[in-house]
Amino acid sequence: MSDSAQQAKAQKKAYDEACKRVLSEREIMAHILKACTEEFKDCSLQDIARRYIQGEPSISRIAVEPETISPRIESEQTEDKSGAEGTVYYDIRFHAVAPVDGKMIQLIVNLEAQNDFNPGYPLLKRAG
């Protein structure tokens, strides 16, 4: 690999890590949860950031196997293996609790930054 290709790869990695650090800030995650999820639409941003987001986010570090079907969640990892795509890392994974019908429910949330506005497939296809 040429020096310029190595530099470009290193810059891309640094940019990716910086994006993940920004997205993993509680105040940013609060905006995302409020705008994108039904559970938080009526909550204040301050409550989401300080009360509902739990613990520290995991950023691109642990593996999980999606082809293994289980009736319950067995892990809380940030990496996924897919026969079609190989190893896939979740950018940011964190816990939140949400007020639903007067009860608190536990959520595991995965955030993934996109660097392509039109990746050629619906982004919701990757959500789930």
Image (cartoon, rainbow, N blue to C red):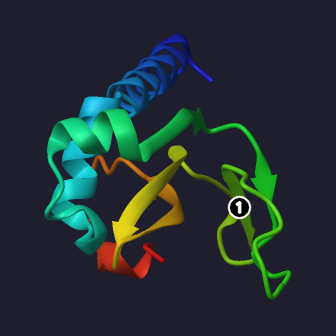
23 displayed left or right of 44: right
Point 32% across, 26% down: residue:
22
Rendered location of residue 55, percent (x, y): 56, 34
Total of numbered circles in the picture?
Answer: 1
Residue 117 seen by the camera: no
Point 42% across, 52% down: residue:
111
Point 79% across, 52% down: residue:
63
Q: Where is the N terminus found, in terms of image quarters? A: top right
Rendered location of residue 99, percent (x, y): 35, 65
Q: Which residue is mark 1?
A: 80
52 displayed left or right of 66: left
Tell me if residue 66 comes above or below residue 16 in the rendering. below
Point 46% across, 56% down: residue:
97
Query: Between residues 103 and 58, which one lies in front from this camera angle?
Result: 103
- Quadrant hosting residue 21: top left
Rendered location of residue 100, percent (x, y): 36, 74
Amino acid type of the residue that numbered disc 1 sits on in the rendered structure: Asp
Q: Circle 1: is it few (<14), some (14-19), or many (20+) Cα within 10 Å?
A: some
Residue 2 seen by the camera: yes
